[in-house]
Structure formats: structure tokens, C-alpha cells
Amino acid sequence: MSNSSALPISSPWTASTAAAIKRYRIDLVSDTVTKPDVGMRQAMADAEVGDDVYGEDPMVNALQERVAALLGKEAGLFMPSGTQSNLAALLSHCERGDEFIVGSSYHSYVYEGGGAAALGGVVPCPVPADENGNLRPDDVRAAIKPDRTWFARSRLLALENTVGGQVQPQELVERLCALAREQGLLLHLDGARIWHAAAASGLAPLQLARPFDSVSVCLSKGLGAPAGSVLCGSRDFIGRAARLRKTLGGGMRQAGVLAAAGHYALSFNLPRLGIDHENARQLARGLSGVPGLKAHEGHTNMVFLEVEESRRGPLIEFLAARGIRIGPADSRIRLVTHLDVSRDNIREVVDAIKAFFR
């Protein structure tokens, strides 16, 4: 008999870590670990629902329209996940044998299972991204192939904002998009954390999304919803994406229960993102000057720790024993603040990390 509680072999977490998760009081692994609060759960319980595969769920329809309006697009499509949303966008824009140009560290290239190539025959062409996720226009220009039969057809430029918690400079984004347009490319934005980019930059989501043909945004990263992303673009584009959503197994029935969580997140959790950003700054500054540790302060809700390799595992275990979860033990350990982490929690984490290095 299989053990359904066992972690996959490919998981970065050990079984002992998995068993300890219930003990964690402070979880800084990601802003996807948030739990719906009482208000969100009540909104989900009260949701009016219908069959979304037939386009009859009023909460889903309203959410799609709401997010599309926030981003200045004609239509939206509710998806179970950001991975599926990005994949549907790539496959809607590209045909088999086409190529999409993407940053070498971007989520749609590195962390989404190679879905565009595996399921759509679409070839990724990675170009170098610097430590802040920025692409150089010259590198993008060099990656665009001539229209010759022996090359994959360069079809799409796929950008991301934020990247590793860093807001992409809007002037650079617009230069890259203008370059792509001049060369006949379409434009997609993985805006999973576009809400964070807007809060940190002071620019409206509509302004950040304006240069793009399509934008994918997430409701479970930072906004506290249990699941869901929305893909936005023209009506024709969303029509193609809806067919692909069905093909990819993303058709849901009474999805209004999840859409209600998205509405609640936009109304109540979106306006408070600045608190998470300030908590991240306090965390980074509280750890500055600790011998054996470098804490990198970012633009939004992420802090990265540089720790000697031999001490990464012991640090994670030391904090876990105190009910604090970070990790995994990569070359830079990411700590992410979110609505379930308070200012008092930040002080406790700073004190615990300092105690370890003492």
C-alpha cells in the first residue's frame, strides 16, 4: 500500500521537515503559505456559484471582469494556478516550432516544468538576466532570429515583474517591449506579483500591464487567497486561452468559492501589501552586520540571506526547533514576509538568527 503522506522524491523538503511543518509558528518560506482568514472564509461560504465551464458562475465572471479592468485589458480568464495561466498564454501566442524569448532566471522558463516545450512544442530562448532580473535590450535583440526556414520562429517576448522580489524598471520594460514590437513579436507578462510591483513603485497595475498583449496575475502570492490566477488580454486571445485551459484540465465547475476568495483578497489584502514590504526591510536591516551572514534587502517582501554552505542546514534546523521555517538551503536562502507574519514575528526571527550566529 502506498503512503499518501510521503513527500515526492524531488521535494526540497525532508520527511522530518514535513512532519515539523505543523509546529511552525512563523513561516517565511513563501507568501503562498498564507491561510484564509475568517473574513475570507465567510466570503467563500457565502459565494453565489454556478457552473464555470458553462460560463455561468457569477463570482468567477465578476472576478474576470474586475481583474481585466484593473489591468486595462478587454477580458480575463480565471485559472487554478499561475503555472497553467502562463502556459495557456504561451501556447495561445505561439504555434509548434515557435520560440519565446525569456529571462534566464524567469519563472516561466526555470520553474514551470518546461510545459511550453513538453506540451506545446514551443521552444524557450533564454537570455541573460542580471541579479535584479533585468534584461539588456542588446541581448534581446540578438536573440531574435531572422525569418529563415532553419530557425525557430521568434514569436513572443515573455517578461516578469517582480523578479526575485525586485521591481523591473518601467522605463526598461517599455524599451524592451518597443524593441519586441518593432521586430513583430507579441508580449506576455508573468505578473504573478504585479501587485507587489505596483505597491513598491507607486505605479498602477494598469500602467505596468499596458505594454503587454497578455498578463497573468496571481491571487495566492501575497494576497492570501488559497488558489487562483487570472489571465488577461484581448477577447480573441482569451477565447483561445479558454480552449487551452480546457485542454490542460483547468475547467472547474462551482469555482465561485475560489473566486470569492480572490474578490476578498483584492478588496482587503491588496491595500496592505506595503506592510509586508516594510516588514521585509525591518528584517534585512535587523540582520545587517551579523558576522557570517549577508542579508540583501529588496524592493518588496523578499530578503535573501548569504550563508556559508556548511552553516545553511544547521541554521534552518536551529530556527525550525524554535518554530520558524525558512529554506531550502540554497546558495541564497529566501525569506518572504506576508500577511500571516507580524512585526513581532520579525523581531523574533531577527533575535533567533542572531542567536544562531553567536
Image: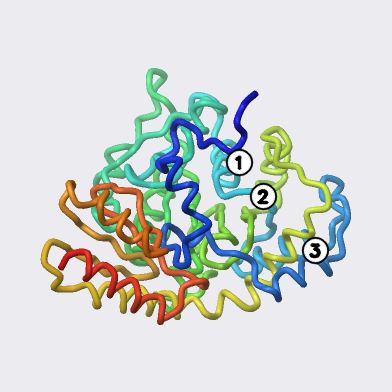
In contact (CB < 8 Å): disc 1 and disc 3:
no
Q: Which residue is mark 3?
A: 59
Q: Nearer the viewer's eye, disc 1 or disc 2?
A: 2
Q: Position of residue 223 (x, y in %)?
A: 56, 68
How far is disc 1 from disc 2 in space, using C-alphas?
A: 9 Å
Q: Amino acid at mark 2?
A: Met
Q: Position of residue 140 (x, y in %)?
A: 31, 44
> What residue is rendered at 35% in x and 75% in y?
348
Neighbor class of circle 3 (other Cα within 10 Å; few <14, some 14-19, many 20+) is many
Front position in the image: 137 or 350: 350
Quarter-of-image position of residue 148: top left
Count of labels in the image: 3
Q: Which residue is mark 2?
A: 79
In contact (CB < 8 Å): disc 2 and disc 3:
no
> What residue is rendered at 68% in x and 72% in y?
264
> What residue is rendered at 49% in x and 28% in y?
117
Mark with earlier residue (1, 3):
3
Numbered badge on residue 88: 1
Quadrant of the image containing the C terminus: bottom left
